[in-house]
Image (cartoon, helix red, strand yellow):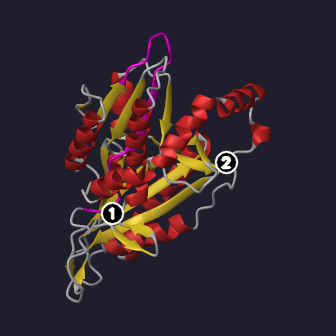
């Protein structure tokens, strides 16, 4: 008697096919990509405003003060870096960042319901509200050694650039603005946001914009090469796919049951052959895999995480359709290989 492998896909509704595949579709997220600034691409009004700012003595003095604060800011950088903050576990780092905001004058700063640290530096009124943010979380799991080490004049540690450096820069900007007694017309909202990495799915920023409908602009600090500005929202869909089967002994049950891992392997091979446009840039990857119980077991389960991105929605959805189609096709083929009726 043969037994099919099954797949369940939660997108968010579950349905079963022969090889059980479960795919968790995250809500559309947005990343950013780096684009080198080219003066000829800027509107004349923007170029003029930039030139006026860079010619203003007060602005030049402010920029010099930021540079002068660099060495002091390294203390904030080291302190925050050495507080691990894996996705969904940013609380301890959030509390430390909150304490520094309050110490630098934002006494009303607080941690919101989603875990973001939010502090407002009030303007004089009737100006735009600008959010300045850096994310609290890093991609590194709990238990990672996050001790900062210096080698060849450089500081090294997991997550130190992405994005703990951004947090330290926010604190430096706040200190310098206060020290230089700079007033702004609009409010400046300093935010250490959660959920930027992996399956965090930008939960922190989504919550922020849902709760604050009066935000007029956003500057998000992210690591990038010198001389670049991060622009253009890039759509991202992520799926977590789980393959389920009856399992069995690698020898005794051979020929009777399909393998969840083999089915996943077929899916990965098909996904690897997908072609995407170079422009708008559209990408995909199977980022992580896992499953099985032992070397001598026909795997009863397997799982993989898939990331799909594009600068435009149409090719994103088209690629996603191909990826999900590859999963369904692989399930069908694995069951057929062992004569399983689906």
For label 2, the SS is: loop
Q: Of helix, strand and loop, which mostly describes the magenta segment?
A: loop
Q: Could you tell me which quadrant the N terminus lies in?
A: bottom left
User: Which residue was labeled with disc 1?
Assistant: 19
Q: Quadrant of residue 75?
A: bottom left
Asked if the stretch drawn in magenta spans residue 7, the answer is no
Q: Could you tell me which quadrant the C terminus lies in?
A: bottom left
Give the number of the disc on residue 280. 2
Residue 123 visible from this viewpoint: yes
Tell how many labels: 2
Image point (45%, 22%), residue name: 215
Q: Is residue 57 left or right of residue 317?
A: right
Q: Is residue 21 left or right of residue 39?
A: left
Q: Is residue 96 left or right of residue 180?
A: left
Q: Residue 258: horizontal and vertical position, in percent? A: 31, 74
Image point (21%, 69%), residue name: 246
Q: Quadrant of residue 77?
A: bottom left
Q: Residue 182: horizontal and vertical position, in percent? A: 47, 26
Mark 1 vs 2, N-terminal side: 1
Front residue of 44 and 256: 44
Separation of marks 1 and 2 at Cα, in angstroms: 34 Å
Q: Residue 285: horizontal and vertical position, in percent? A: 49, 62
User: Does 288 sit above or below residue 168?
Assistant: below
Chain part drawn in magenta = 121-141
């Amino acid at each position: 008697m043969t037994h099919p492998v099954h797949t369940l896909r939660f997108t968010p509704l579950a349905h079963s096919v022969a090889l059980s595949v479960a795919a968790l579709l995250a809500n559309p997220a947005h990343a950013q990509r780096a684009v080198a600034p080219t003066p000829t691409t800027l509107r004349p009004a923007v170029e003029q405003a930039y030139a006026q700012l860079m010619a203003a003595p007060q602005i030049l003095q402010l920029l010099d003060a930021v540079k002068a604060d660099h060495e002091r800011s390294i203390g904030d950088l080291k302190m925050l870096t050495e507080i691990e903050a894996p996705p969904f576990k940013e609380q301890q780092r959030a509390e430390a960042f909150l304490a520094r905001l309050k110490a630098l004058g934002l006494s009303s700063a607080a941690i919101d319901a989603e875990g973001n640290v939010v502090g407002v530096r009030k303007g004089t009124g009737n100006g735009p509200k600008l959010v300045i943010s850096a994310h609290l979380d890093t991609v590194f799991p709990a238990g990672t050694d996050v001790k900062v080490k210096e080698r060849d004049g450089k500081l090294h540690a997991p997550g130190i650039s992405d994005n703990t450096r951004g947090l330290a820069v926010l604190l430096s900007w706040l200190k310098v603005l206060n020290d230089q007694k700079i007033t702004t017309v609009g409010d400046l909202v300093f935010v250490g946001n959660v959920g930027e990495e992996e399956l965090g799915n930008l939960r922190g920023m989504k919550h922020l914009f849902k709760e604050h409908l009066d935000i007029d602009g956003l500057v998000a600090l992210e690591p990038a090469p010198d001389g670049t500005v991060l622009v253009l929202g890039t759509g991202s869909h992520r799926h977590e796919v789980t393959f389920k089967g009856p399992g069995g002994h690698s020898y005794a049950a051979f020929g009777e049951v399909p393998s969840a891992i083999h089915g996943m392997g077929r899916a990965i091979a098909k996904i690897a052959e997908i072609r995407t446009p170079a422009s708008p840039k559209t990408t995909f990857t199977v980022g992580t895999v896992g499953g099985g119980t032992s070397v001598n077991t026909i795997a009863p389960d397997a799982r993989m995480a898939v990331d799909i991105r594009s600068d435009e929605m149409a090719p994103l959805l088209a690629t996603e359709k191909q990826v999900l189609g590859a999963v369904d096709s692989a399930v069908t083929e694995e069951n057929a290989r062992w004569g399983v009726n689906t």
